[in-house]
Image (cartoon, grey):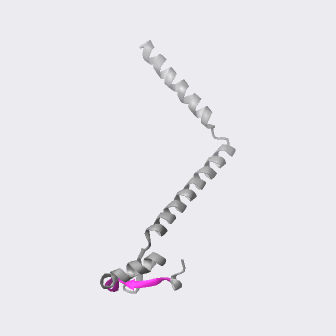
Amino acid sequence: MKASNLTTFSAADATTRFAELLDTALGQPVGITMDDRVTAYLVSKSAYEAMLERLENLEDQLWTFQAEVARKEGFAEQEEVEGLLRRLRNSGHENAKAK
């Protein structure tokens, strides 16, 4: 979104022309200004949900990438971690029985 193409409403206009503001936001993001600076954006429900979905997809890609980097750097595989945890749990039970 380029700021030059952004439709803006002053905070005062946003209050008095709220229905128009909502109609405009259905088609494109709208900037709300205070003291000639954009301080907030109003976006449609579908645009907001699309942004959230895109963000979640990017987070998933980041986690996948980080996991692959960790695997290549020699960090433990999932099976190794689970096996270690099982051994630690079992040794904890054996120590408790011995006391």
To which quarter of the image does residue 44 belong? bottom left
Would residue 12 appear left or right of 74 to someone viewing this image?
A: left
Q: Residue at x 43, y 81 (%)?
A: 24
Quadrant of image for the C terminus? top left
Is 71 drawn above or below residue 62 in the view shown?
above
**In the foreground, 57 or 82:** 57
Q: Residue at x 46, y 19 (%)?
A: 93
Q: Please say whether residue 82 is one of the residues in the magenta stretch.
A: no
Is 15 drawn above or below residue 67 in the view shown?
below
Q: Which residues are magenta?
A: 6-13
Would residue 11 appear left or right of 80 to someone viewing this image?
A: left
Considering every residue shown, the one lying at the far right of the view is 72
Residue 87 position within the rendered picture, expressed as x and y whole percent measured from the top left: 55, 24
**In the foreground, 74 or 86:** 86
**In the foreground, 26 or 65:** 26
Quadrant of image for the N terminus? bottom right
**In the foreground, 48 or 37:** 48
Residue 5 position within the rendered picture, expressed as x and y whole percent measured from the top left: 52, 84
Q: Is residue 28 visible?
A: no
Q: Residue at x 47, y 22 (%)?
A: 92
Q: Residue at x 57, y 59 (%)?
A: 58
